[in-house]
Image: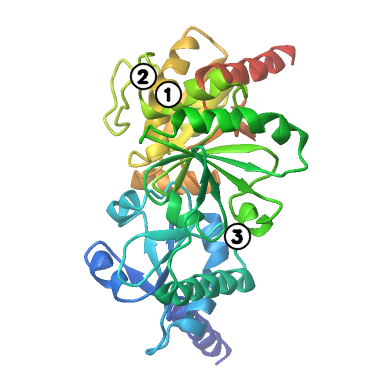
Amino acid sequence: MNQEMCIFILVLLVCLQIVNCHDEDAHTIQYNSDIFSSEVPKNNHFIMFYAPWCGHCQRLGPTWEQLAEMLNEDDSNIRIAKVDCTTDSKICSEQDITGYPTLKFFKRGSLESVKFRGTRDLPSLTTFINEQLRSIDETKNVPVEVPSTSDGLVELTAENFEKHVSQGKHFVKFYAPWCGFCQRLAPTWEQLASKWKFDGGVTVAKVDCSQYRTFCDQYEIKGYPTLLWIENGEKIDRYQGQRTLESLEEYINKMLGTTTEKIPEFKNESNEEVESPVIILNKDNFKKDIEKGITLVKFFAPWCGHCKRLAPTWEELAKRFSDSKQARIAKVDCTVDANKPLCSEEEVDGFPTIFMYKNGAKVTEYDGDRSLDDLQEFVNKHLDKHDEL
């Protein structure tokens, strides 16, 4: 009798677990490639682009479902939804999703979006939604604020920023008036704007973070001045060079593709070349291949724009260390089904993610500039430490 009772309880617990799993996302709308473009314009949407193996996504899941339960009513003017980027990579590629989770707000009647950059808790998420819905109501009868311009330098605010940078290429300075470095850069930045004001390829702009602190926090501005290159509403690069007029102009030319320096073509990383010096890692050889010496591993997705831009640099980096017996340059394609558990175990939450391993153990994540010289210096630094052991 006791044995039968134990079996009954065990079966009951399993059934309850199944029900709980089934109801976990009961209120959140799941979109796929078949219906995304037709359904999203029908209403305002707040959408989470995610990967099931992503740790941050898993932690956000209950909060996202709570948000959906609150707002996904029949007569609501907002829909809470999500897209699985591992099964619907086409959507995520079109939306330029390079990290998980990415949260975007879509206005009714459009597939253009505003990216959420705040803290992923319920109060912050609801505040963001209210701000977006309020902006829709305000713009129905009020003309859009036009950014003020002085001799080519565009002055942006929290109200006009998203619309201004949503199309085209923009070089934006985030600053504070009291900052000494900002004060020294100011005349150079004005000169730069004046020189490029008649060139349709880029606008030179600025944002005063002392007035729009919350907005600058959303863009993760940690210090002043911060110079960002933005294309079609997406942050592409952070300028880290010298703040001279010549260096800034050279950077603009490089980003516009008008530099005389030959820029290597992007390679599609899904088509591996036999002669490539980059070591291809997967779930079967990963642990064995990183167990000795140091290994710099790039976790990537073939559709990721940042990964494509990094690809030729990664090839060249591997060539420079091809004769080394202690340093290896490798990569893992996280879109391959067999590799997804590996990427999850290694806590890869965005692309590209670069980790340094030493004798089989993860040492650190590389978060510096992705130039060839900086990457080589990073490897050499860890190589020197390894030789000292």
The residue lying toward the viewer, choosing from 28 and 128, is: 128
The reply to whether callout 2 and callout 1 are in contact (CB within 8 Å) is: yes
Q: Position of residue 73 (x, y in %)?
A: 42, 87
Quick check: 12 left or right of 303?
A: right
The residue lying toward the viewer, choosing from 141 and 320, is: 141
According to the image, label 3 marks what residue?
118
Q: Quick one: label 3 or label 1, which is nearer the N terminus?
A: 3
Q: Quick one: label 3 or label 2, which is nearer the N terminus?
A: 3
Disc 1 packing (10 Å; few <14; some 14–19; many ≥20): some
Q: Position of residue 144 (x, y in %)?
A: 44, 64
Quick check: 150 left or right of 258?
A: right
Residue 292 in sight: no
Q: Which mark is residue 254?
A: 1
CA distance separating discs 3 and 1: 31 Å
**Where, quadrant-wise, is the N terminus in this rendering?**
bottom right
Question: Of the residues shown, which amino acid type is indicated by label 2?
Answer: Ile
**Residue beneath the point at 59% across and 24% down:** 241
**Residue beneath the point at 64% across and 46% down:** 221
Question: Of the residues shown, which amino acid type is indicated by label 1?
Answer: Lys
The residue lying toward the viewer, choosing from 162 and 303, is: 162
Quick check: 31 left or right of 248?
A: left
According to the image, label 2 marks what residue?
263
**Residue beneath the point at 26% across and 30% down:** 271
CA distance separating discs 2 and 1: 9 Å
Q: Residue furthest bottom?
A: 1
Secondary structure state at the residue bearing disc 2:
loop
Question: Of the residues shown, which amino acid type is indicated by label 3?
Answer: Gly
Q: Quick one: label 2 or label 1, which is nearer the N terminus?
A: 1
The residue lying toward the viewer, choosing from 37 and 28, is: 37
Secondary structure state at the residue bearing disc 1:
helix
Query: Against 3, is 50 above or below?
Result: above
Query: Against 160, is 62 above or below?
Result: below
